[in-house]
Image (cartoon, rainbow, N blue to C red):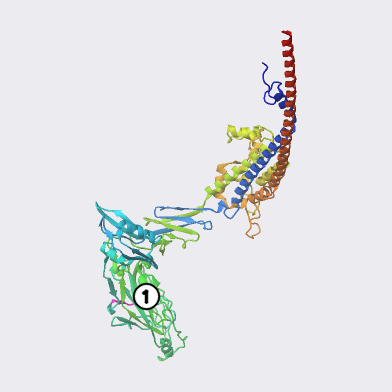
Amino acid sequence: MPGINIPGVTDKYNTNNTVEKLMQIERIPLTREQKTLESYKNQQEAWREVNRRMSSLRDSVKTLYSFENPFNNKITSSTEEYAITADANRGAAYESFKVDVIQPATADRFLSAELDSDYKVPSGTYTYKIADKTITMRWKGGSLQDFSSALNRRGTDFIQSRVIGASKGKKTLSIESLKTGEENRLSFEDDAKTFAESSGMIIKVKPKTVTFASDRNEFKQLTTMTTEEQKHMPAISAKNISVNNREIKIPPRSGFEVGLPSSVKDNPKMHLFFTLKKEDVQDITEELNKKAAKPELPYAGEASFRDVTIHNSPADPMLPSDAEVKREPLKSIVTNDVIFAKYEDGLEKVIPAKDLLSKSQTDFDIDLSDYRGIKSIVVRNRNTGHGFLMSDINAFDPGENLGFTAQNAISTAKDAIIKYEGITIKRPTNKIDDVVPEVTLNIHEKTEKTATIEIKPDTEAAKDALITFVGKYNQAISEINILSQSKPEIIEELDYLSKDEKEEEKKRLGLFLSDSSLTSLKSSLQSSVSAKYSYSEDAVITMLSQLGIATNSSSYSGYTPSKLRGYLEIDEKKLDSALSENLEDVKNLFGFDSDGDLIIDSGIALNMDKKLTAYVQSGGIFALKTSSLDSRIKSSEQKISKLESQMDRKEAELRNKYGQMEGTLNSLENQSNSISNFTNRNNNR
């Protein structure tokens, strides 16, 4: 029985193969257009990669002349880094200075006595005060840990608490201020004070005061000033000083010195408190100017030889004993500088009181930590028309006078104290940024010996930036070489590429062989890095090659193609030397303001930036290349879509025709078989 043949399904007559071969011929325009589209896309991707490489190079060269260029970076070093370090801004000067850390700034930190693990903190209103900041927490009562957690949530950035395991079954509570400095003392109010006392964190204390300068016998005569403000003005003396009911009367042109008790002098926490009441009296210059002046004869002189001195006889003016001379009238003296601190070395420092003469009473509160090495208080009233009534002097420790003191203090609030070039400086924090311009000093510990802080250029940052620039430049040049030339050795010379990466690069080799824009860009870049930039007459470095950065093609004898591709190489020793010895020249080489308008208008980096910008900016050469390909790709995709539709119709048409042909042939074959069968039956009869 003959087989069943279904047109379009079975392939008895090999029509499918025939149709496919016919379609291959029909698809030639489509295949050609698809290859064209792929070529367009490859070109577009290549232009985008070029744009990425050139943009990366431009970003690199911008950093070499912008405000944040690495040549202005500063680094600091400290000979005592455990105690003090420094951070320098870009505007800091290159310098070296000496610092002694007397003490770092600390904060109050209180510790309770050992409490039972199940200790409950009573309910109440807990108020903690740090300077002018108040933290108030309403507590419903609970465990130490819950109290500590609640206080931490409430006192963020100001106060911190933690529970510390002590002996077995015991715990302690730590509460500390997060603000350093004497002005940020931690104090307890309301139920917080009651809890601090009951938990053994603080104890009540009685204020301790040392009183002195209440007895006339304590006063010393002032030493005569080496220079007097006016001739014939009475010297300042203690003879008119009187004490009545612990009040010291200080007439014009009077003064005295009173020593500090040793218990006060040796305690820098002490403060001295006293008052001065102003008394307006008749100006003594009025009476002095009424008195006649006697003639003053010059010293007759003397002669000395070895240990023998002979004095000349006084001159005899042959004037009557009541003779008078004319003199300049004395002028009134008015000054607020009355109280002085006298040091062990005899030097005096005024204790300022700028409103002393404009107020009826002035209160003095002298922090002895500001006057380290003080020996005594000097009262020198140079005024001619003002007297004073002075109280005795009370010395006390403000910390103790809070009414309580820490029973288990871990640390107490203190200011940081340093000596900068011998000058004592006091600050409430361990970050001090107002002593050295553009430099922040970081205080850690007390110095054992004087620390030397040095600020110098960050040549490593500059070197890294230049190495990055050379790397970006070489990547850009290699990209141009691959796309604009068809030499396989260009790829083989790139040792940093893996085998697979080299194979991928070979597909792009010579892709823009006929495009002159890349060769033009390469030429511009090479001219920029090889040009001379004379930014001043005495400049030492005016070319990139003087830094040890060059193509080095002339340094090799013979023909070496890889050295002629335009890549830059670095002589590291030469570069290190240039950065160390001529950093300012290196900076100016890459970017320089030639006309003083604070705008960089010359230099390698600026020149390259301008040339690269024309290519990579929006609407630039590369953008035009990719946008042009966008149009071509869109047109090609439309053409392909149209050809694919045509191919579908053509294939359907061919399959339909060949299907009909198969049907006709099958029909004829069936008729032939029927006739043959009929004939065979008749012959068999």
113 vs 629, nearest the viewer: 629
Count the labels in the image.
1
Q: Residue at x 68, y 17 (%)?
A: 2
Q: Position of residue 102 (x, y in %)?
A: 37, 60
The magenta-colored residue range is 218-223
Which residue is the site of mark 1?
A: 364
| Residue 17 left/right relative to 177 | right
* Residue 435 image point, x, y percent: 46, 62
Q: Is residue 642 above or below residue 224?
A: above
Quarter location, residue 193? bottom left
The quarter of the image holding the C terminus is top right
Residue 429 figure quarter: bottom left
Q: Amino acid at mark 1?
A: Phe
Q: Is residue 297 magenta?
A: no
Q: Is residue 229 left or right of residue 401?
A: right
The answer to whether any part of residue 198 appears in the image is yes
Q: In the rendered image of this protein, does residue 391 appear above or below residue 664? A: below
The percent coordinates of residue 135 (x first, y second) are: 37, 65
The quarter in which the N terminus is drawn is top right
Quarter-of-image position of residue 447: bottom left
The verdict on residue 219 being magenta is yes
Is disc 1 placed on a helix, strand or loop?
strand
The residue sitting at 40% across, 88% down in the picture is 282
In the current view of this chain or complex, which residue is farthest to the front? 685
Image x and y of residue 477, in percent: 65, 41
Residue nearest the observer in this picture, 16 or 46: 16
Q: Nearer the viewer, residue 477 or 599?
A: 477
The answer to whether residue 532 of the structure is visible from this angle is: no
Q: Residue at x 38, y 59 (%)?
A: 153
